[in-house]
Amino acid sequence: VIRQARRHDEEALVALYQRALPVIYRYVMARLGRPDLVEDVVSEVFLVMVESIDELRTEQEAGFYAWLLQIAQGKVSRALRQVTRGERRSVPLPAYATGAYPAAELMATDLLSNPVALHEWRETLEELGLALESLSVEQQVIVIGRFLAGQKIEDIAQALGKQPGAVRVSQFRALNALAGHLGLARGSQRKGKGGQA
Amino acid sequence: MKPEEYLDRLIEIREHGLEPPPAANDEIAAGLAAAQALARLNEIDIPPDFASKLELSVRLRARELAHQNDRSLSTTRPLRISRPLRPTRPLRQQRPQPRRAWIAALGIAAMLALACFGILTVSAQSLPGDPFYGLKQAAEQFKINFASSAQDRISAQIDQVHSTLADLNTVVNNRRGDDAINVALNTLNDKTKSAQAAVAALPAGTNRDSAQSNLNSVLSEEDQTLRHLIQQVDWSTRLAFTRQLGALGDAIPTVTRVTILVQSNRTLLITLTGTYFAPGARLVIDGQPAGIVTGNTQVQLTAVLSNTTGLFGQHEIGVLNPDGTAAQITYRKDTENDQPDDNHPRYGTPQPTRSPGGDSGE
């Protein structure tokens, strides 16, 4: 598909788009948290994909995701630069709460019937966005490729030109950094473990 | 095992839907919890409207770039789409002056294509009696003619029987008038026959069995629909529905002869002869129930009609079964001396109506 897409084959490009849209949309949503910004950024990412696909040197899916996520990361950073930090991170939560952005566009529909879970999920999304921002571009590519695109460590390693062991180390560090930002480290996690036991 | 490997192993276990064993230490447990939190991002729904609009943009941009790559169109200015990302490309600036003729031709072609698309879209929604219904039929015929295989062709034909049945249902329920109903019924008849013939022409085998099964299903649906709708239509359309039920192989009433005797008390004794007269069948004269039925068998119906004026001139005399099926025959008596109670064969369903002149030989 990637080979055909490089020749700007319409169906191949659409196939790639359909496969990657959920990954990119969710990543950008986590980073930006505002549907109005998200749609602009995601649109830009995919139009860049169409225009620049011939520059992609890999034919592996993981490589494609890594490439696209780097484009998305760049677009997100650019969008964030254009929005002041105060607007960006103080507006979204009240905006969700006041219904400025339809919750159905952000959340799985089964959450909508549970206000407590919905509130927790909004907070998690907010925190995830901030936590992802703290990771390096490569770490973001690894964790998003792994947990949103469903890629294997070995494939991601090949896409990044690294050894799988090195990618596992990066993943380990990234997840611990995220856990720190999300308040999942130590105390909160002990509680979780206790619950499992 | 190194912590990063152990964490990765636990993540994989969880990805397979299993509960991982307790983490070896807090760091691993925290990493696992973070992975779980990240995976929750998959709960975010993608707005379908946005997804389809963006797909359209992707398609348009892909086409534009494909055209640019096409050497034969290399000098043509590409169609602009929403939000071009690199509007100041050197390549575009260096492009020769666009050929207005090409642009005009492309514009006209696009407009024509749009117009055709619009007409086809409208015609696809049209109903019998609508101006574009003929175009819809032509498009459906085109689809059949250019089906890639006999199986696809038959499948299309059966689908079209189904859709015509839906059209008929709509025009009857919307009371679109007899003309529209008759168009729908004639179309249904044609499509049913075509589908039956196509299936019969298939060589024996599993393909034919499968097609026959599909056809039987739609024919059964057709039968049920006709029997349901026949109760809602007027007399003349009822006759047409009855003919179509006959074409499906149902037992339907027919009238082959009518005799009328003037009795001593000046009442008329009317006797209809034919087939499949059901218990409870009624006499119908010129589309209106008339007389009192005094005898009724499967092949003969006798009724008495008060006679004040006689039945001079031409009349349509028929039978209406309780299930709504009907048949009639033309009766003509011009003078008191005529002997109309002869055995001239006259039409009844399922034969088409003959001209009155051809039936007035008495």
Image (cartoon, rainbow, N blue to C red):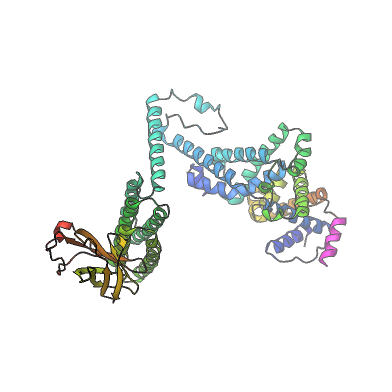
Looking at the rendering, the stretch of residues picked out in magenta corresponds to A186-197
x, y (%) of residue B317?
A: 25, 63
Q: Is residue B216 visible?
A: yes
Farthest residue, direction top: B97
User: What residue is drawn where x is 71% and y is 66%?
Assistant: B18
The front one of B222 and B48 is: B222
Looking at the picture, does residue B96 appear above or below residue A15? above
x, y (%) of residue B197?
A: 28, 64
The front one of B241 and A176 is: B241
Looking at the picture, does residue A114 appear above or below residue B131? below
Left or right side of A132 for B57: left
Left or right side of B38 for B110: left
Left or right side of A146 for B136: left
Q: Is residue A190 magenta?
A: yes
Q: Is residue B308 magenta?
A: no
| Quadrant of the drawing holding the N terminus of chain B | bottom right
x, y (%) of residue B138?
A: 32, 49
x, y (%) of residue B67?
A: 44, 36
The front one of A33 and B184 is: B184
| Quadrant of the drawing holding the C terminus of chain B | bottom left
The front one of B81 and B190 is: B190
Q: Is residue B353 visible?
A: no
